[in-house]
Amino acid sequence: MEALDRRGRPLRDLRISVTDRCNLRCTYCMPREHFGPDHAFLPKSDILSFEHIADVVGACKDLGLRKIRITGGEPLLRRDLDVLVKLLRDVHPEADLALTTNGVLLERHAERLLEAGLDRVTVSMDALSTPVYSAMGDVEHGPEATLQGIEKARAVGLRVKVNCVVRAGVNEGELVPLVEHFGPLGVPVRFIEFMDVGATNQWSLDEVITSKKVRSMLAAHFGEVTPLDATAYGEVARRWRTPQGWEIGTIDSISAPFCGDCTRARLAADGSVHTCLFSTEGKPLMPLIKAGASRAEIQAAVRSIWTERSDAYSEERSKSTQQPSERVEMSYIGG
Ligand code: SAM
Ligand code: SF4
Ligand code: SF4
């Protein structure tokens, strides 16, 4: 039976972080000064096995789960990720099964992921030009591997979207080139407002370029964009069409929060459940799992976590008393 939280929101989506590690150091997510060689990532013994993740998904299925997103950290750093995809597909054949990745390792994995049952992939890419790409990701290389990953994913038949975090003074100049490149390929680019998630990214409102501004910048180049209908309940992106017929998306997390229909839970790599991106602590499932709990027992635990939920951080951001230092990082909780 479906689970509703204290605001009447159903549990529809599960984002699963399969690792807290990453091969990039995006300044807005894992700044190198906090995620350097001394950073204590989760030890292997604390990370959920694929079988345990599938058990949790099986437990959530009867609570109303429809969408599953595998994320991280960088999920493609987890060995044999296609094995997890296959397990999830078997346990929930009707689910919309997606992967969020920086795409650097996608080319070599795309085909096996599709064969295992993945429906689609969202590739994060903040710039096409090498200097801006490498500055945003704090890496030596440019976007070539990610572009090849996207091409391969499209060629094998995965549906692809691109996510771009917009940061004032850093990558505004990339918005038009990204749409010009991906629009004709039928790949929607979704622009995300830089968020105050975690405690390390030195977020400030001055660095947020609102989606409205993004749309006016694009309109100045391509012509006015027109709104499209939302595709699904709880869809985070607002969809738009350029006069050329290309779809773009905006994720207005700061300027127009969407907590009212937030149907997302997050399963961190260590098995803790978080009911908000801005949570300060999760509810651990690992002790239950290690004790050999049945699917029904895991389901009861998730139901109780969800029905207790009343989160609406983004809508209450301005009056929040939560200290940034208490918030968990996006790379751990799963973006
Ligand atoms: N490593 C994968 C990737 O980059 O796609 C998956 C994990 S990443 C945490 C998931 C998404 O979160 C990415 O699209 C990333 O751009 C976004 N993200 C991370 N930090 C963010 C922030 N401070 N504000 C907005 N989006 C952010
Ligand atoms: Fe890694 Fe993704 Fe975070 Fe960038 S956004 S540091 S690629 S987890
Ligand atoms: Fe959902 Fe929390 Fe984001 Fe609001 S702030 S949309 S409750 S994750």
Image: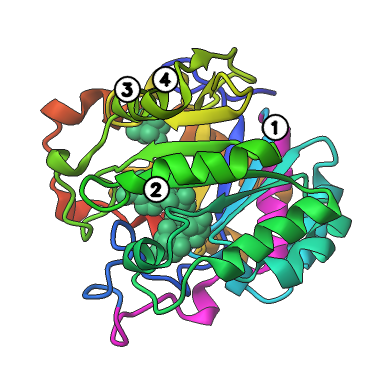
Which residue is tagged 4? 6
| In front: label 4 or label 3 | 3
Where does the magenta region start and end?
Answer: 36-63
Which residue is tagged 3? 212
* Residue at image location 30% in from the left, 80% down from the top: 39
Ligand 2 in which quarter:
bottom left
Which residue is tagged 2? 174
Residue 94 visible in the current orientation: yes
Mark toward the start of the polypeptide (1 vs 4): 4
Q: How is the image coloured?
A: rainbow
Q: Is residue 268 above or below residue 321?
A: below
Which residue is tagged 1? 66
Q: What mark, if any, has residue 74 been given in the picture?
A: none
Task: Name the image quarter holding the N terminus.
Answer: top right
Asked if labels 1 and 2 touch by Cβ distance under 8 angstroms, the answer is no
- Judging from the image, what secondary structure is the residue with disc 1 in? loop
Disc 4 to disc 3, C-alpha distance: 31 Å
Asked if labels 3 and 4 touch by Cβ distance under 8 angstroms, the answer is no
- Give how far across and how far down residue 227 sits, in percent: 52, 13
Q: Categorize mark 1 by other alpha carbons within 10 Å: few (<14), some (14-19), many (20+).
A: some
Q: Is residue 47 magenta?
A: yes
| In front: label 2 or label 1 | 2
